[in-house]
Image (cartoon, rainbow, N blue to C red):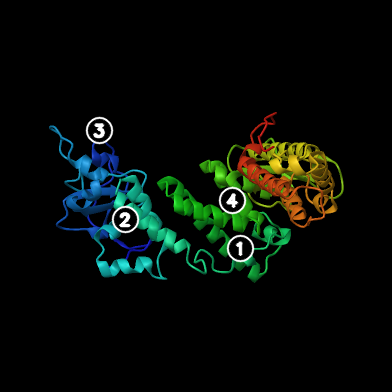
Amino acid sequence: MTMPSASSSKSSTPTAGEEEEESSGSSSSRRATTSIIRDEDYYFEDGSCILLVQDTLFNVHRSMLSRDHSSFGAMFSLPQGGLEAEGKSDDNPIVLPGDKASEFRHFLWALYALPHELRIINSPGADLTLLIDIARISNKYSFKSLETWALDAVHEYVNRKPSPLFFTSIDTYSSSSSSLTDRSSTSTSTSSSSSSSSSTLSIESTESLTRLIQLAQLCNHERLLNTMINLLRQLMSKSLQYAYLAMKLADDLDIRALRGSAYLEVMQKSVVVRKPSPSASSTSTTTTTMEEAEGSSKDSEREVTLKEGSIDPQGRLVISPSQRLRLLSGYWNLTRQWEKLRTHPPVFAHSSSCGASWHHHGCTQSWVEFWKEKTKGEGVLEMGLADVLGRLRKVQKDYEKWGSATYMHHDCRLAARRCIGELVRGVEEKLPDYFGDEEGEEDYGVM
């Protein structure tokens, strides 16, 4: 037995009957217009359970499907009554909706593979698609041990150095608008051969990242999910494409740990975020209107169909209305939060020895003067208005450089340092809340 691939061949063997029109609900009429074939690798002559996945019949052993306390075992134990049991013949198979034949073939490979064949899973030549399919099907049919084994193999695969998820180093993914435009399907410029290659590799990597984080979320595999979130955070700081991917995945899968940082990264990119036209459909494509350089008549307008996540010819990211609303809310909430922080220095508990042997008022005054001076310093003002985390970290650095030339008590200096650190962590934890769907008056509790 050899490891199957997604394009594994199949044999066209006798089917479940010719195409015919029947009004009855029999299994033959259900598949009357479909050409059914037997799988070349997993239609065993001595099999005891026939399954139909898409247009492919698998004949495997019930004892194999009943292992690991799977849902198949529970299904086989149900009484059939007077009806003919499904899975006994090609004409009346057990139908598995929602699965692909290639995925189920990969799953069966894991069930039937010999020990020496399984070694490839932990080798440099491991097939990520194979592992993902095994984990997904195992999760669906409650093969818990097999699911855990496959997910651990996926996690090991992802953590290899250099990462096999990328055919080139992460640093090759530039966030410049020109390279992003080359990647966009709507770009009118001609890409060079090297740009086309980078685009292809980037698309493949994006698809792999999406499938992996969806799998980790589906199977509730915390280690894999955390690994993928950390990887996306690294990638999105280098490319707007990955920042948008992280933002979309955070929304689609409700990943709080990723949402705040992803939205913040998109908001801080130099590419202008663009709102789709009101005439856009509710699907993933939107319509934007672009005026010609000269002329203001209606004839000078032309419509260009753009896909969400792409870059328009003017270098702007196309996003959905709901994403735009969250970005605007985030900008408003973060700028307002910074104004509160700037005008209200954090309060910390003074050391008991400060009041006994130090001028308590002078200690407080020294801290307040430092805070007001540094929060309007040149380094802070160079950052974006909504970059609260960046500004706080700059103040934190300035505090470390403040030295001993201060009228603050030593213990109070340590308390103030902890206070700044807690402030940074508080903003990080509350970051997803800033990017709500509506502008609100919430107190995010970071002060």
Q: Nearer the viewer, mark 2 or mark 1?
A: 2
| Residue annotated with mark 3 | 24
Q: Position of residue 59 (x, y in %)?
A: 21, 53
Q: Looking at the image, is mark 2 or mark 1 earlier in the sequence?
A: 2
Q: Looking at the image, is mark 4 or mark 3 earlier in the sequence?
A: 3
Nearer to me, 432 or 270: 432
Quarter that holds the N terminus? bottom left
Res. 102 visible in picture: no
Q: Looking at the image, is mark 3 or mark 2 earlier in the sequence?
A: 3
Proximity of marks 4 and 3: CB atoms separated by less than 8 Å:
no
Where residue 194 sits, quadrant-wise, is bottom right
Crowd rating for badge 3 (residues with CA inside 10 Å; few <14, some 14–19, many 20+): few
Where residue 155 sits, quadrant-wise, is bottom left
Q: Is residue 167 above or below residue 315?
A: below
Q: Amino acid at mark 3?
A: Ser
Q: Is residue 324 left or right of residue 342?
A: left
Crowd rating for badge 2 (residues with CA inside 10 Å; few <14, some 14–19, many 20+): many
Residues at marks 4 and 1, CA–CA distance in whole angstroms: 15 Å
| Residue annotated with mark 4 | 245
| Residue annotated with mark 1 | 199
| Residue annotated with mark 2 | 107
Name the secondary structure under disc 2.
helix
